[in-house]
Amino acid sequence: MSSVRVIGDSDFETEVLKADQPVLVYFWASWCGPCRLTAPLVEGIASSYHDRLKVIKMEVDPNPETVSMCKVEGVPAFRFFEGGEVKKASEGAISKQKLEDFVLSQLSA
């Protein structure tokens, strides 16, 4: 079972901004080839760090409010939130190791 939660604009405040633990938000699009390659990596991060990290998946096209607020300009994109604020951001395709480094750099900060 996946520990990645799929949400929309209406859930963003509750699930991300008011979360009591760090949150990795993965922005993707159905038409994005690199997103299809990145999705399994996100699932892996969610499984590996489920006890310390909430992982959220948001499709960009139906969620323009959050995309604008998070300044997402391309997909795939990642935003690491803690305490309701973006602590780190990344856009573009990313390797498994770079994604893990991205997450760990924030979890251990």
Image (spheres, grey):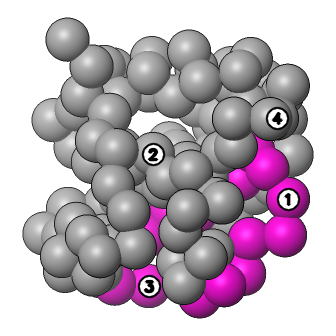
Rendered residue at 56%/51% (across/down): 59
Mark 4 vs mark 1, CA separation in Å? 10 Å
Q: Which mark is in front, 4 or 1?
A: 4
Q: Amino acid at mark 2?
A: Lys
Q: Position of residue 3 (x, y in %)?
A: 24, 28
Mark 2 vs mark 3, CA separation in Å? 17 Å
| Residue identified by numbered label 4 | 32
Q: Quadrant of residue 61?
A: bottom right
Q: Position of residue 49 (x, y in %)?
A: 30, 31
Rendered residue at 61%/76% (across/down): 64
| First in residue order: circle 4 vs circle 3 | 4
Q: Which mark is in front, 4 or 3?
A: 4
| Residue identified by numbered label 2 | 57
Q: How crowded is the residue under tag 1: few (<14 C-alpha within 10 Å), some, or many (20+)?
A: some
| First in residue order: circle 2 vs circle 3 | 2
| First in residue order: circle 3 vs circle 1 | 1
Q: Are marks 2 and 3 in contact (CB under 8 Å)?
A: no
| Residue identified by numbered label 3 | 85
SS at mark 4? loop
Mark 4 vs mark 2, CA separation in Å? 14 Å
Residue segment shown in magenta = 68-85
Q: How crowded is the residue under tag 4: few (<14 C-alpha within 10 Å), some, or many (20+)?
A: few
Report the number of discs.
Answer: 4
Q: Amino acid at mark 1?
A: Gly
